[in-house]
Image (cartoon, rainbow, N blue to C red):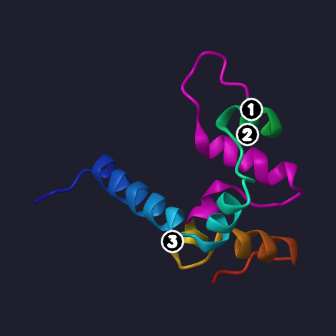
Amino acid sequence: MNVSNSEQRQVRLKQFLRILSEDPSLSHQVEQGKLRSLAELLMVSGYWPCGEPVNMSSVVSLSLKKLGLEAGSEELIEYIMNGGTVESFIDSVKQGPFNRP
């Protein structure tokens, strides 16, 4: 049975979102009420959708750049999929060359 590229991407996205939902560094943010709304994230990142669907990959990449990090959404996804957390990703990128978990 052939699985299409689109189906593979959907499975990978679901897996990523499940892992992200279990990220203890984000759970801490939720408990402290520090998570931002999508509207706030768009403003902070400088992303303007201009009537188009929001490209969350671009929002994440722009947000990382606003934090002064030289990494994008693809690196974040790979890091998370390999067992890292958002917090450890940010710390790792701040410390220098990107390191995998």
The amino acid pointed to by label 2 is Leu
Q: In the image, is 56 to the left or to the right of 13?
A: right
Residue at the limit of the structure toward the left, as seen here: 1
| Closer to the eye: label 1 or 2 | 2
Q: Amino acid at mark 1?
A: Tyr
> Where is 67 relative to 90, above or below?
above
Q: Which residue is mark 2?
A: 41
C-alpha gap between disc 3 and disc 1: 25 Å
Residue at screen point 77% across, 48% down: 63
The residue that label 3 is drawn on is 81
Q: Are marks 3 and 1 in contact (CB under 8 Å)?
A: no
- Which residue corresponds to the image point at 65% horizontal and 81% vertical from the top-left? 100
Kindly identify which residue carries mark 1: 47
Q: Residue at x 15, y 57 (%)?
A: 2
Alpha carbon of mark 1 to alpha carbon of mark 2: how far? Answer: 8 Å
Residue stretch rendered in magenta on the structure: 48-77
